[in-house]
Amino acid sequence: MNLSLSTLSISAVFTILSAVGISQAPASAIVSSTPASSVNLLTNGSFEDTTLAGTSQAQLTSGWGTYSQINGWSATPNGKIEVQRGVAGTPYAGSNLIELDSDNYDKTKFSANNPLGLYQDVATVAGKAYTLSFAYSARPGTAAVENVFDVLVGDTSNVGNIFKTTIYDGAGGADTAWSIFTTTFTANNALSRIQFNYQGSLDTFGAYIDDVKLVNASAAAVPEPSAMAGIFVVGLGLVSLKKRKAFKKSLAS
């Protein structure tokens, strides 16, 4: 019989071990498990797709572009989303990134109560925990005052009521220097908003973000195939040891 260790479940492994005379592998034989891969609940988290369904909006292939909407994301009222591809810094993931102080907007339309930013609404389950993460960097060659922004999570009508923080990333260097921000929150509605608001100088040069992810924080941890194979192999070793001991006892008697 051919057994594929990569397809064995934990219960199958222990069933095999039990059948050969081992009821349970010792704690030292259990290889630590790692969390299962979680699907990003956000659409277009690394901003690679600048198209918009139902329109003729084109895919960005080089340089930069500003948009009221791109796949998955919307600009705050009167604002624009600026997507860059090979402009002033190396992206964290893929080929594109977002500059939060975008371009082609009217500065007079913005204030502390009406910030420049972008957001995405995502289906959630009230009472369930989610983990938000993203990469951020100062724009290369800019002063610290340019690289300030807020991160907000909340209801669509009251974004920030669940979580809000301000990130100060300092002055930009010769290239992007990415950091990762992560937080876990509990949703309180069937629809949650993830939003980034720019808080630096409105001069079209500002902080970068990339690779935004939202995952289910309560996803069960399951062993990788290699871990289950390890359990199985250690178990077989214990079987062999048990048989050797039994053989020695028979000789001694």
Image (cartoon, rainbow, N blue to C red):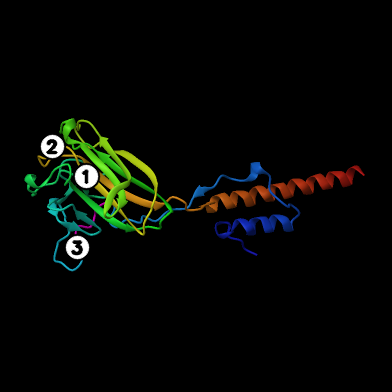
Write down the residue under mark 3: 52
| Left or right, residue 45 beside residue 240 | left
Residue under the image location 58 percent in, 52 percent down? 228
Residue 50 is covered by the magenta coloring: yes
In the rendered image, is residue 65 in sight?
Answer: yes
Q: Which residues lie in the magenta part?
A: 46-52
Q: Are marks 3 and 2 in contact (CB under 8 Å)?
A: no
Precedes in sequence: disc 1 or disc 3: 3
Identify whether 23 is placed above or below 89. below
Residue 196 is covered by the magenta coloring: no
Give the CA distance from mark 1 to mark 3.
Answer: 22 Å
Residue 99 x, y percent position in the rendering? 18, 44
- Report crowding for label 2: few under 14, some 14 to 19, many 20 or more residues within 10 A (C-alpha): some
Residue 80 x, y percent position in the rendering? 14, 51
Identify whether 235 is placed above or below 89. below
Which numbered tag is attached to residue 201?
Answer: 2
Residue under the image location 64 percent in, 44 percent down? 29
Mark 1 or 3: the one toward you: 1
- Report crowding for label 3: few under 14, some 14 to 19, many 20 or more residues within 10 A (C-alpha): some
